[in-house]
């Protein structure tokens, strides 16, 4: 048994080394692939960062920062979100504690198939054990290509094998039955050349056949690569925005994974924060007009939203939906709108027609302000941060009348200036709360129960929140970004806009 375990461990190390030779080309969730989750594993407060694999199968990197100093051991294990595989947990991997930072643990996990996964994290320490589950959507966006240097090395080795095989076939025909030191006669030489010619034909034919087979397999695999879905928007009479969402991944998934519980469809959507869709409209290129709306579903794949009074301009569309497996998607698109005199905002719909972005202090519509609590250190790409904001009144005093907004202390959108990076983040992180519910309870019907296990998310017994809120997130790439932070006060949703430069 010990020898078998050692062999499996060695194989894992070899596969991991080969995987690390591949370039990182995946971009999930509209080019913001990493997952950030702030939650409680029993008595322990953890910030979990998961960097999905570039391609699937592939290796996900896990980083866990413990707010508590008494955590002594952390184990991680990957599980499917739904289906029979969700009940069959592999042997857990023990995360390594950093030698330089005892509150930081890291690990690596194999993700073997595409679809909805979760990473179970079990923390152990002076206060016993605790567990939490972090949803992880796993997709391949691109097919990885081999590095040029590695390809050249393998080509040379392959050519040596081909030459060696052909030479051995000829030598066997010429010299197999010769006495030591004897030279082959012309007949044997001729037979040797004939065998070499036949071997060359066989080898070249095998290589050509193998190349065609490999191309067919690569093409089939490429068809399974995740494609960002695009939403089509049309303005209808009565200032209604009609939305048609697409599913470019359904046909190929049905063809190759017909019975998979992870098959993406448009009739399997589940509510997230009480809504099937969270629609964000952001004016481009200035990004001053920002709207967070919740269209109604008219039929499968068709939604409509009554627009408020929206300034004229081109708007970037980001439409968040969640499938029944907990797999989140963001449909993207653009729409040109004339100046619209619509209905007043109602329910959970919110937004502002003209926002002035700031690096540190954003003025709110009612004259109060929102302050970004950060030090002078530069923002670095691919590093997790707690983005902290404080809401103050006109006199600079902390606000005391904050309320939950769709069950959360607040919502934030991180958006790159070119619009290619979009992330809808909550105080619990970048994951969809419906997905968290499935990961924790096995169902999306009790998201309130799941949210009570997250850091600072049990609002059922709170009359007010704040005045400070935080969001765990990390910018995926350097560049310039906009951050939109939304909170609810006295029944009104207010939006603060900030700018950030990331190195």
Image (cartoon, rainbow, N blue to C red):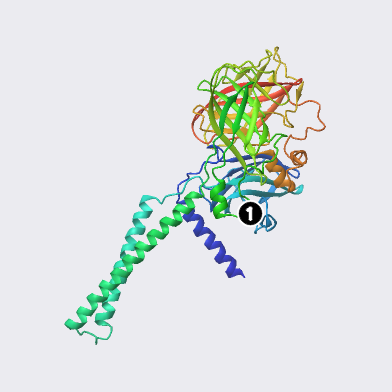
Give the residue at x 26% y 73%: 196
Residue nearer the viewer, 98 or 120: 120
Is 424 drawn above or below residue 58 in the view shown? above
Residue nearer the viewer, 400 or 347: 347
Q: Is residue 311 left or right of residue 127?
A: left
Characterize the local packing of mark 1: few (<14), some (14-19) or many (20 or more) Cα atoms within 10 angstroms: some
| Residue 382 spot, x, y in % from top left | 53, 37
| Residue 143 spot, x, y in % from top left | 46, 49
| Residue 441 spot, x, y in % from top left | 75, 47
Q: Is residue 283 left or right of residue 448?
A: left
Is 71 drawn above or below residue 277 in the view shown? below
Q: Which residue of the protein is positioned furthest toward the front in this rendering?
A: 237
Residue nearer the viewer, 38 or 308: 308
Q: Which residue of the protein is positioned furthest toward the right in this rendering?
A: 461
Q: Which residue is mark 1?
A: 94
Quarter assignment of residue 353: top right
Give the residue at x 26% y 77%: 171
Question: Dividing the image into 4 quarters, which one contains the N terminus?
Answer: bottom right
Q: Which element carries disc 1, helix, strand or loop?
A: strand
Is residue 8 in view from this perspective? Answer: yes
Q: Is residue 64 left or right of residue 460?
A: left
Give the residue at x 63% y 30%: 279
Q: Is residue 90 left or right of residue 159?
A: right
Quarter assignment of residue 490: top right
Is 473 drawn above or below residue 199 in the view shown? above
């Amino acid at each position: 048994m010990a020898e078998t375990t050692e062999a499996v461990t060695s194989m894992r190390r070899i596969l991991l080394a080969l995987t690390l030779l591949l370039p990182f080309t995946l971009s999930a969730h509209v080019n913001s692939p990493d997952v950030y989750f702030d939650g409680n594993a029993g008595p322990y407060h953890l910030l979990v960062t998961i960097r999905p694999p570039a391609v699937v199968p592939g290796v996900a990197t896990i980083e866990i920062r413990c707010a508590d100093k008494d955590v002594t051991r952390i184990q991680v294990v990957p599980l499917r979100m739904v289906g029979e595989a969700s009940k069959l947990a592999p042997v857990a991997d023990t995360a390594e504690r950093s030698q330089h930072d005892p509150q930081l643990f890291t690990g690596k996990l194999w993700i073997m198939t595409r679809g909805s996964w979760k990473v179970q994290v079990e923390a152990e320490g002076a206060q016993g054990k605790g567990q939490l589950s972090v949803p992880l959507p796993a997709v391949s966006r691109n097919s990885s290509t081999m590095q040029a240097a590695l390809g050249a090395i393998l080509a040379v080795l392959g050519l040596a094998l081909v030459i060696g095989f052909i030479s051995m076939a000829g030598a066997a025909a010429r010299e197999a039955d010769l006495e030591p030191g004897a030279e082959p006669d012309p007949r044997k030489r001729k037979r040797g050349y004939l065998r070499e010619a036949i071997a060359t034909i066989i080898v070249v034919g095998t290589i050509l056949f193998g190349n065609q087979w490999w191309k067919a397999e690569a093409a089939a695999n490429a068809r399974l690569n995740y494609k960002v879905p695009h939403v089509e928007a049309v303005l209808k009479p009565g200032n209604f925005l009609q939305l048609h969402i697409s599913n470019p991944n359904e046909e190929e998934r049905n063809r190759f994974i017909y019975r998979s519980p992870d098959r993406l469809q448009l009739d399997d959507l589940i509510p997230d924060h009480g809504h099937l869709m969270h629609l964000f409209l952001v004016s481009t290129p200035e990004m001053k007009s920002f709207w967070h709306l919740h269209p109604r579903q008219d039929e499968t794949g068709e939604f409509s939203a009554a627009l408020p009074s929206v300034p004229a301009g081109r708007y970037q569309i980001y439409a968040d939906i969640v499938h029944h497996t907990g797999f989140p998607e963001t449909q993207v698109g653009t729409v040109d709108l004339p100046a619209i005199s619509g209905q007043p905002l109602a329910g959970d719909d919110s937004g502002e027609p003209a926002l002035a972005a700031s690096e540190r202090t954003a003025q709110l519509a009612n004259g109060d302000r929102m302050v970004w609590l950060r030090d002078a250190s530069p923002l670095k790409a691919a590093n997790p941060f707690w983005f902290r904001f404080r809401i103050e009144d006109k006199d600079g005093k902390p606000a005391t009348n904050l309320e939950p907004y769709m069950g959360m202390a607040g919502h934030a959108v991180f958006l790159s200036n070119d619009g290619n990076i979009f992330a809808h983040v909550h105080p619990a992180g970048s994951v969809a709360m419906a997905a968290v519910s499935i990961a924790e309870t096995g169902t999306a019907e009790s998201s309130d129960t799941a949210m009570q296990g997250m850091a600072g998310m049990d609002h059922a017994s709170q009359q007010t929140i704040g005045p400070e809120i935080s969001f765990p997130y990390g910018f995926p790439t350097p560049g310039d970004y906009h951050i939109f932070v939304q909170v609810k006060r006295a029944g009104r949703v207010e939006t603060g806009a900030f700018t950030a430069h990331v190195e």
